[in-house]
Amino acid sequence: MNLRDRIGIDVGRKLSVEDAIAWADENDVTYIDCQIDISPNELERFDGNCCDSIREACAKKAIHLGLHTLSAVNIAEISPFVRDAVDQYLKTYIDVAVRLNAEWIVVHAGYHFTDDKVRRMEASLERLKRATDYAEQKGAKLLLENLNWEPDRAEVHYLAHTVEESLYYFDRIDSPALGWSFTINHATLVPEGIDGFLEAMPTNRLDEVRIADNNGEYEIHLYPGDGIIDFADMFSRVEATGFGGHYMNAFGSLDDMLRGREQLVSSYAEAN
C-alpha cells in the first residue's frame, strides 16, 4: 500500500460513523478514526443492528475503521463509583469495537493534579492492564496515545506525555493487545522530540502515527507547514523503523485533512 493510501483521516465526531464511511469512500480514504461517545455517535446507540450495518459497509467499501476514546475521561480515576464507571467505559468501547470489527481503539493514560501523580499513575496502569486483558480475550487492539504537555503551572497534567511516562506503561503491559499510537505534534512539546520518542519507544509496537503540525510552544493542531515539523524527515525516520501501519491526519476540517494528505505525500516524494 502506498503512502497516500496509508494516510487516514480523524473524523472524530464531525460525522456519524455511517456518514464517515460514505465520505471516506467518496474521497478515496482508506483509514478513518471515529469517536463514539456523544452525538452524532452516542455510545449507547451501537446495538446489534447498527453495528451489523456499519461492519458490512466497511467490508464492502474496504474502509479500515478505528475508534478513539475521549481524553477527557480520566483513565487515572480513583474516586469511588466513578472509577468503576471508567472501567465500564473502556469495556463497552471494546465490546462495540468487536461488534463493528473496528481494527483499533485509541486509549489514554489519564491525567493527574500534580501532588497525586504517583497514585494516579498506579491507578491508570492497573486499569489499562484490566482493559488490555479484556481486549486480548475479545480479540480487540488498544493503542495507547502519548498525550500533550501542559504548562508547569497548570493544575492538570496528562500522563504518558513524555518517553519516561509512556514507557512506564509499555514496560509493564506486555501484550499483543496493546500497541502505540504516536502523536508527533505532542512529541514536539517535550525535550525528547519526535526523534527521542522513536529512539526510546518500542517501535515494534507502533501501529498508528497521528499527524498535525505544532508551534513547539503549546498544544495546537496546525496544518502541515504552518509549524515547526519537517514532515519529509518525519516520514523517513518513521518508515526507517520498519513501520508499516497507518498515519492519521488530525487537524482542521475534513477538507483541510484531505488537502493536507496530498501535500504530505508530495513533500515526502520530493525529498526522496
Image (cartoon, rainbow, N blue to C red):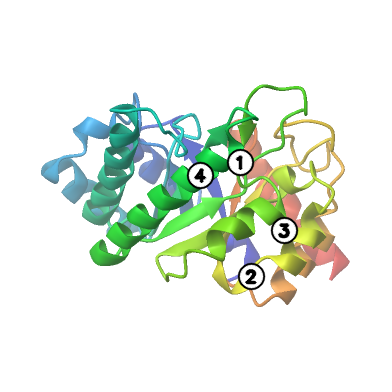
Distance Cα–Cα, label 3 vs label 2 = 22 Å
Q: Which of marks 3 and 1 is nearer the N terminus?
A: 1
Query: Do callouts 3 and 2 mark residues in contact (Cβ within 8 Å)?
Result: no
**What residue is drawn where x is 45% and y is 34%?**
70
Q: Mark 3 points at which residue?
A: 265
The kind of residue tagged 4 is His
Q: Mark 2 points at which residue?
A: 203
Q: Which of marks 1 and 2 is nearer the N terminus?
A: 2
Q: Earlier in the sequence, mark 4 or mark 1?
A: 4
| Foreground disc of the pair 4, 1 | 4
The kind of residue tagged 1 is Ala
Occupied quadrant, residue 23: top left
Q: How crowded is mark 1: few (under 14 residues within 10 Å), some or many (20 or more)?
A: many
Residue 216, horizontal then vertical, whole percent = 84, 38
**What residue is drawn where x is 70% and y is 71%?**
239
| Nearer-the-camera pick, 217 or 192 | 192
Distance Cα–Cα, label 4 vs label 2 = 18 Å
Residue 222, horizontal then vertical, whole percent = 74, 34
The disc at residue 108 is 4
Q: Name the residue under label 1.
A: 250
| Nearer-the-camera pick, 251 or 95 | 95
| Foreground disc of the pair 3, 4 | 4
| Foreground disc of the pair 3, 2 | 2
Q: In this rendering, does residue 138 appear at all?
A: yes
Query: Do callouts 1 and 2 mark residues in contact (Cβ within 8 Å)?
Result: no
Query: Do callouts 4 and 1 mark residues in contact (Cβ within 8 Å)?
Result: no
Q: In this rendering, does residue 267 appear at all?
A: no
Distance Cα–Cα, label 4 vs label 1 = 16 Å
**Quadrant of the image for the N terminus?**
bottom right
Residue 58, horizontal then vertical, whole percent = 32, 55
